Image: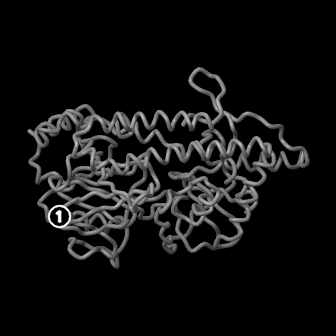
């Protein structure tokens, strides 16, 4: 038998309040990222642990990252799109922010939630809150207090897909059994396996922002048969297939669920069309200017933007999960931003910058990347919040190699050394135009 509904708690770890609000039913979580994802993810009866594919609680240096924890009875949330012990997800309510604009506001009501947050956090009136001061240990004590108010003992979750003592097969069987018991009228619509094997993940793959980023580095890729195809053509194909996939997905949903998702679906289709148009314009610019001039202008924009950032001196870059970083001068950093050496989730810090290590998308460097179109936000997206003040020294930096970026085998230090060697050997000889093969997106 599955656990009774009141004894199952949905738990979400966040790095801030992110638009948390109160409504007649209780707490409501807002989603403010520039992403086609339309689901919010929770673990059940415990906090998700950090693992190779995601860091939710601490950063690579051991500093607190998941400062806010939302604990809510599962019974107060809508029917989940996917049910799992460590990953349960819900599709969000969506609505157009302004009439006639292709912008959506996404949120999820979580009912009678308790919010665990650092002292001084502006938790809205009407929402239960437990405040703490300190780091991970103090946060976890506050989370235990929240669990105690619901009469539930918190599980310490270390695996990616199962509770302690359960295999992945047992966890999947648990999900199927509880989907039938807790949601008998909707069991057929609840995915009881990993998120990446479900329909929601399939729709997320219809996104062209990474493709646009790749188009700033090269014009060509290969299709499944190995034939060359321009990235602009690929963006057009993705827009068409995405529209068809979204329509098919909506057509299989009940009317009330379809109404909740309609605004997001229209926004998703419009964004794909806009990105296809942007790709065509970039492709035309490549042809008109030639590779050397096109890339030189991208680098020049990056260098100009870096000069305006707070702080001074070198930039340091590291991939999440590594304890060392690599130093770059401003000009080299500009070239790295305009190349494949820097990925959107790599960490960047600048000497003298009053900010802790941040994901690029939430940092001043992220705003530079947005100005280059590398991380372009949707029209009307909220501005990133100011990064907090450093509470710990920056991580050590070294000249040792650090795996980084979408190229996998490429290392920042190797990229830097090769760039300097190229400049010494043939400083005036422009590289011959080549067709760049990008990773499949």
Residue indicated by mark 1: 25
- Residue 283 vs 119, above or below: the answer is above
Instruction: Give the quarter of the image for residue 351.
Output: bottom right
Horizontally, residue 59 falls left or right of residue 89, namely right
Horizontally, residue 154 falls left or right of residue 370, namely left
Task: State the image coordinates of residue 251 (x, y, percent, origin top left).
Answer: 30, 35
Horizontally, residue 418 falls left or right of residue 410, namely right
Which quadrant holds the N terminus?
A: top left
Q: Residue furthest top?
A: 225
Task: State the image coordinates of residue 333 (x, y, percent, origin top left).
Answer: 70, 58
Q: Residue furthest front?
A: 100
Report the number of discs: 1
Please report the residue visible at 45 percent of the width from the left and 37 percent of the height from the top: 242
Instruction: Give the quarter of the image for residue 70.
Output: bottom left
- Which is more toward the observer, 157 or 328? 328
Task: State the image coordinates of residue 298 (x, y, percent, origin top left).
Answer: 72, 54
């Amino acid at each position: 038998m599955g656990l009774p509904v009141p004894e199952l708690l949905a738990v979400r770890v966040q790095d801030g309040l992110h638009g948390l609000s109160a409504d007649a039913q209780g707490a409501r979580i807002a989603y403010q990222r520039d992403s086609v994802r339309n689901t919010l993810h929770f673990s059940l009866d415990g906090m998700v642990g950090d693992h190779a594919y995601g860091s939710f609680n601490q950063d690579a240096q051991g500093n607190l990252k998941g400062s806010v924890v939302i604990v809510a009875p599962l019974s107060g949330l809508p029917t989940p799109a996917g049910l799992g012990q460590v990953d349960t997800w819900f599709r969000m309510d969506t609505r157009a922010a302004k009439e006639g604009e292709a912008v959506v506001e996404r949120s999820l009501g979580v009912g009678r939630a308790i919010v665990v947050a650092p002292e001084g956090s502006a938790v809205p009136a009407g929402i239960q809150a437990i405040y703490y001061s300190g780091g991970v240990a103090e946060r976890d004590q506050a989370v235990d207090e929240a669990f105690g108010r619901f009469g539930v003992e918190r599980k310490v979750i270390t695996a990616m897909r199962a509770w302690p003592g359960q295999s992945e097969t047992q966890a999947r069987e648990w999900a199927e059994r509880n989907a039938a018991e807790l949601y008998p009228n909707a069991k057929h619509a609840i995915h009881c396996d990993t998120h990446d094997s479900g329909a929601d993940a399939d729709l997320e793959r219809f996104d062209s922002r990474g493709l646009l980023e790749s188009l700033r580095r090269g014009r060509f890729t290969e299709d499944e048969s190995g034939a060359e195809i321009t990235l602009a053509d690929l963006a057009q194909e993705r827009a068409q297939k995405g529209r068809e996939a979204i329509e098919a997905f909506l057509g299989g949903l009940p009317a009330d669920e379809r109404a909740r998702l309609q605004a997001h679906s229209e926004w998703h289709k419009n964004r794909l069309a806009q990105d296809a148009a942007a790709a065509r314009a970039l492709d035309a610019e490549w042809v008109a200017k030639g590779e050397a001039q096109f890339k030189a202008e991208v680098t020049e924009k990056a260098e100009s933007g870096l000069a305006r950032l707070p702080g001074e001196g070198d930039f340091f870059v590291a991939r999440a999960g590594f304890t060392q970083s690599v130093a770059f001068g401003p000009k080299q950093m500009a070239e790295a931003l305009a190349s494949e050496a820097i990925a959107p989730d790599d960490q960047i810090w600048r000497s003298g910058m009053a900010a802790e290590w941040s994901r690029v998308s939430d940092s001043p460097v992220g705003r530079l990347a947005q100005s280059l179109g590398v991380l372009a936000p949707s029209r009307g997206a909220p501005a990133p919040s100011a990064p907090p003040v450093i509470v710990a020294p920056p991580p050590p930096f070294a000249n040792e190699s650090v795996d980084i970026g979408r190229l996998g085998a490429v290392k920042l230090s190797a990229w830097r050394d090769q760039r300097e060697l190229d400049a010494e050997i043939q400083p005036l000889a422009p590289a011959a135009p080549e067709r760049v093969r990008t990773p499949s997106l």
